[in-house]
Image (cartoon, grey):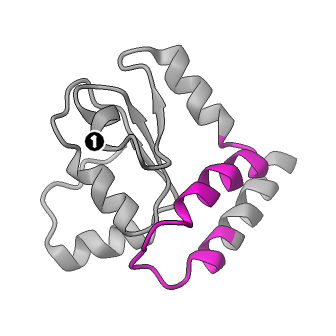
Amino acid sequence: LTFLGERDKNRLEKLYLASDLLIHPSRFESFGMAIGEAIGFGIPVISSDAGALPDIYSESPVLFFKSEDIDSLGSAIKSVLKPAGYTKLCNGFKNFNFKSENWDQKLGSLSDLINKLNTE
């Protein structure tokens, strides 16, 4: 794990677009800006149910787990490790207005990667 520190808008955008999933394990949140940004870039999100997050993102396809519950987090992550689970999560995000134009290409490349990891 590497702490990247502060990033400017361009670098932050590149990081989001290079990502396949956001895991947001917060213990307290009032809004969850990173979740909103990830959704805006078409990145599927797994998030804790801390603070106001479930209320703010209740209409979104964010997959929530119980805050501070490692088993709940583990179950959420396991649910997307196989291609079918990841695809199911991603399909919910396809209905949102994304900035990313290459969503189908990203989904395909990640599915290939997950399939390779599952066979090794």
Establish if 120 lies above or below 9.
above
Q: Residue furthest right?
A: 119
Do we see residue 120 in this rendering?
Answer: no
Establish if 2 lies above or below 55.
below
Q: Residue at x 80, y 57 (%)?
A: 116
Q: Residue at x 66, y 64 (%)?
A: 110
Residue 91, position as x, y percentages in the image: 64, 59
Q: Does residue 1 appear to the left or right of 65 in the view shown? A: left
Residue 15, position as x, y percentages in the image: 35, 68
Say whether residue 73 is magenta: no
Do we see residue 57 in this rendering?
Answer: yes
Say whether residue 87 is magenta: yes
Residue 80, position as x, y percentages in the image: 65, 43
Where does the N terminus fall, quadrant-wise? Answer: top left
Amino acid on which the number 1 mark rests in the picture: Ile
Question: Between residues 120 and 104, which one lies in front from this camera angle?
Answer: 104
Q: Mark 1 points at which residue?
A: 56
Q: Residue furthest bottom?
A: 101
Q: Is mark 1 on a helix, strand or loop?
A: helix
Question: Between residues 76 and 12, which one lies in front from this camera angle?
Answer: 76
How many numbered marks, from 0 up? 1
Q: Which residue is drawn at 43% across and 19% down?
A: 66
Q: In which quarter of the image is residue 28?
A: top left
Q: Residue at x 21, y 51 (%)?
A: 33
Residue 84, position as x, y percentages in the image: 78, 49
Q: Residue furthest front?
A: 59
Q: Does residue 58 appear to the left or right of 44 in the view shown? A: left
Q: Does residue 64 appear to the left or right of 80 in the view shown? A: left
Q: Give the range drawn in magenta.
A: 80-107
Density class for disc 1 (Cα within 10 Å; few <14, some 14-19, many ≥20) is: few
Establish if 7 lies above or below 116.
below
